[in-house]
Image (spheres, helix red, strand yellow):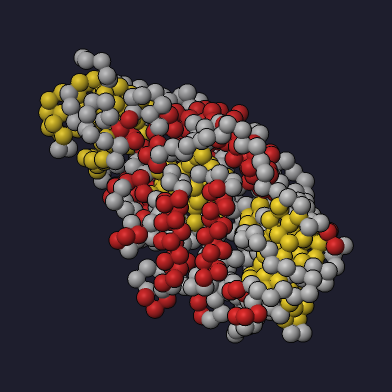
Amino acid sequence: MTESSVEVCMAGSSVSKHSQMGAIPYEGGVTFRVWAPNAERVFVSGDFNNWSKRAHPLAPQRNGHWSTNVPKAKAGDGYKFVILNGQQELVRMDPYAKETICSTCSCLVHDPAFDWGTDAFERPELNKMVIYEMHIGTFNFKGGHKPGNFNTAIEKLAHLKELGVNAIEVMPAMEFEGSFSWGYNPALMFAIESDYGGPRAFKEFVKAAHSDGIAVIFDVVYNHLGPGDLDLWQFDGWQENDKGGIYFYNDWRAQTPWGDTRPDYGREQVRQYIRDNAFMWLQEFRVDGLRWDATAFVRNVQGNNDDPEHDIAEGWSLMQWVNDQIKAKLPGRVTIAEDIRDNSSITGKTGEGGAGFDAQWDSIFVHNIREAIAAPEDRFVNMEAIGDAILHRCGDDVFQRVIYTESHDEVANGKSRVPEEVSSGNAATWIAKKLSTLGAALVFTSPGVPMIFQGQEFLEDDWFHDKDPIDWSKKERFAGIVRLYKDLIGVRRNIRGNTAGLCGRQTNLHRLDIEGKVIAFHRYERDEPADSVIVVVNMKNEPRRGCRIGFPRNGLWRLRFNSDSRLYDGDFGDFPTADVIAKDGEVDGMPSSGEVDVGPYSVVVFSEDKQKQ
C-alpha cells in the first residue's frame, strides 16, 4: 500500500482518532484497532452487527495498522477481527483483547472502569519482603469442572495476612487453552483467564490483597506464546519457513522448548506489544511487580550463558528497555527474573550492560539446600555447599536474589515437595517435618528475598499439578507447623523489633564445622546492638550441647526462635536451648563467645537484649 493511500478510507470505513490498540470504549461507541501489515482488508464482526463479516471495515493506517469507530458497539459486546489476505479469510481473536469468553470463543469489549476506593498501597522494600507463590486454579479449588478462581482465592487472604506474608506471586493468569493449566501457555497475553473470573475479578483480588497489606507480583511469559489456541500464529496470513508470521521469529530463532513460538523481539510492533502488556498489569491492574518467566530463553535461543552463537541481542535490549521504562515511569514497581543460570548481569544496571531486573530467582540456593536436607545420611551432607548457598549473591545487593526450597518448578515434573522428598510416602514423619522446617528456617534467615510455595506452611506433600488442590484441612492438622512459619516470618520481617539484622545486607559466616555439621552466621546492617542477629544451624540428627560459638559482643543474647520447640509439633524434642551470655574470648574470628545448645536438625536465632546488662 502506498504512502499516499495509507490514510484514505475504504467505503464504509473511517480512521479512528483514538490511538490505543484493541477495543477501546468511548462515549457513544468503540474504537477497534489492530496490526495486520499483510492484510488486504480488515473487518470487525460482533454482537453490534449480528456477526456480519463485512458490515464494518477498518481503514488502513501507517505501519500496518487498521482502525475504525463503531458507534453502536458498547462494553460487553463480543467481537473478532476478519482478515482478508489473497484467498485467505482469517477470523481472529484480538491480540490486545482484555476480556474473553474463552481463548477461542470471542473477545469482549472491556470496560476498564473500576472502583479502587482508597487504595494507595506501597509495596514493601525487598529487604522486608516475604513472597508466597500462588497458583489460582489450585490454591482454593472447590471441586467440579472448573478450577479455583480469584474470588475463591480472596477467601484465603486472611490466612496469608495472619501468616505474615506481605507479597503474593501469582502464577500466570493470562488466557490459556482449556480450563486447567499452570498458566505458562498464554494464548492471549492481555486477557485474564476467563475461568479465573476475568479482569474484574483480578482487580478485586489485587484490591483485597492491598487492603490486607499484601503486594501482588504478576507472573508474565514473554519467552514464548501458546502454543495452543494461538490466534497470533500467522495472524494476517503471512509467514516464512512455515513459521508463525508477524508476531514471531520465522527462522531458527523461533525454536523454544515449548514450540516455535518465540516472539520477534527485533520487530518494533512486537516490542511495543510486550511493553504495553507489562505496563497494563502495572497501571490498569495496579500490580506491584512482574516476575518474568524463563528470561534465559528471551536472551538466548538455547537458554545458555556464554553462548554468543545463540544469543538474541534484541531480547536482551527488550528486557533493558522495559525495565528502564518501568523505573522511569512507575518507580516503586519491582521486576524479578526467573533466569536460573546464575547470571549476575540479569540484575546488573542497564547503563553498565545489565538487564536491569531488581532481583532474580537463585538456583544455587535451592539446589544446594534441597540436596543437603534430602541427603540419605548425615555424613553425606555437603556443609560447604550449604555455606555457598547462604553467601551466594546474584548481584551487588544480597536482596537481588529470591531464595526458596519449594517453587512450582521444584515440586513438579517428577520432583516432590520437600517433606515427601525426605520421607517418601509419609511426609508427616518426624524427620520429614524436622528437615523441611530446617530448610524453611534457612530460607528465612539467609540473605535474600524469601519465598514459599502455596501449602508449604502446612506440609503439603503431593507433587504440584494443575488439578491437585491445596488440602486446607492440613492447616488445622499441622497448626503447629503453620505457627512455625508464622514465627519465622515474624523474625525475618523484624515484626517484634528485635531481629532487624535479618533485614540487613551484611553476612559473616563465621562457623562452618564440616565434621560436626554446625553452621553459624552473623546477619546485620551496621553491626550495632540494635541490628545484630546470630543464627546457628545443626545439620545432624543429634543435639549439640555446649557448642562454643563466636558472638560480636559481650552480653546477653536472647533466644528469638527455636525450630525444635514443641509448640510447633508434639513430636519435636523441645531441646532446652537457652539465652546466651557472651563473654570475652575470641572464637570463629569473633571477639566474644558463648555456649549454645541446639536440638537435632534445628535452627536457633539469637539477638542482643536491648536492655543494658
* Residue at 40%, 39% in the rendered image: 125
The one of 465 and 236 positioned closer to us in this rendering:
236
* Residue at 52%, 66% in the rendered image: 271
Where residue 529 sits, quadrant-wise, is top left
Q: Is residue 508 left or right of residue 449?
A: left
Q: Quadrant of the N terminus?
A: bottom right
Where residue 543 sits, quadrant-wise, is top left
Q: Is residue 203 left or right of residue 388?
A: right
> Where 132 sits versus 193, above or below?
above
Residue 457: give x, y in percent of width and height: 52, 36
Q: Is residue 56 left or right of residue 561?
A: right
> Where 124 sits versus 310, above or below?
above
* Residue at 36%, 34% in the rendered image: 603
> Where 70 sits versus 238, above or below?
above
The one of 566 and 449 positioned closer to us in this rendering:
449
* Residue at 46%, 48% in the rendered image: 330
The one of 260 and 320 positioned closer to us in this rendering:
320
Where residue 535 sits, quadrant-wise, is top left
Residue 526: give x, y in percent of width and height: 23, 34
The one of 462 and 556 positioned closer to us in this rendering:
556
Residue 511: give x, y in percent of width and height: 23, 40
Residue 75: give x, y in percent of width and height: 76, 51
Q: Is there any visible trace of residue 375 in the rendered image?
A: no
Q: Quadrant of the C terminus?
A: top left
Q: Is there any visible trace of residue 395 in the rendered image?
A: yes
